[in-house]
Amino acid sequence: MKNKNKSTKFPVARIKKIMQKDDEVGKVAQATPVLISKSLELFMATLVDEMSKVTVERGCKRVEVWHLKAAIERTEMLDFLKEIVDPIQDPYPNGADEGTAGVGPDGKKKRGPRKKKEPVD
């Protein structure tokens, strides 16, 4: 099933079905699922943008779950998500850069690449 409304990224028909599963919701105006879809898109864009900022600041190449937690904790608009991410433990509790600390998330020292031995003549 293709999205008929190309201006939204999330499926409007599925959003409408989810809304109508609630007994308290009666008829849904045609514009309401489109508005919710666009709102969801903007929310996700904000969340991903904040996570990528944290990832770049920490010098990582990969977005990890603790970057999500750090993004939520430092963005006032995302305060309502704090209790959801509370159980996630940050392997770098003081916000230290992973690259400069020389210690991995498991607390062990990272090893660098091995040097090649030169042949003895």
Image: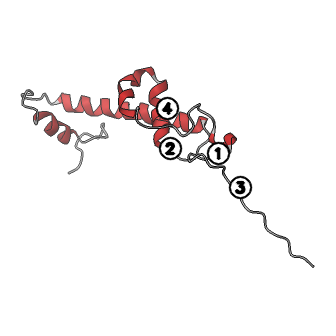
**Nearest-to-viewer mark from 4 and 2:** 4
| Badge 4 vs badge 2, beta-carbon distance below 8 Å | no
Determine contact: label 4, label 3, CB under 8 Å.
no
Query: For the view shown, which residue lies furthest in the bottom direction?
Result: 121
**Lower position in the chain sequence, tag 4 or tag 3:** 4
Dot 2: what SS?
Answer: loop
**Alpha carbon separation for disc pair 4 and 2:** 11 Å
Give the residue type at disc 4. Answer: Ala
Q: Quadrant of residue 6?
A: top left
Numbered disc 4: secondary structure: helix
Q: Which residue is mark 2?
A: 63
Dot label at residue 70? 4
Whether the residues at callouts 3 and 1 have beta carbons within 8 Å, the answer is no
Q: Earlier in the sequence, mark 4 or mark 1?
A: 4
Q: CA distance from mark 1 to mark 2?
A: 18 Å
Q: Which residue is mark 3?
A: 112
Q: Where residue 55 sits: x, y (%)?
A: 55, 39
As shown in the figure, which amino acid type bears the numbered disc 3?
Answer: Gly
Counting residues from the start of the chain, the first of labels 4 and 2 encountered is 2
Q: Amino acid at mark 1?
A: Val
Q: Amino acid at mark 2?
A: Val
Residue appearing at x 21%, y 38% in the figure = 12
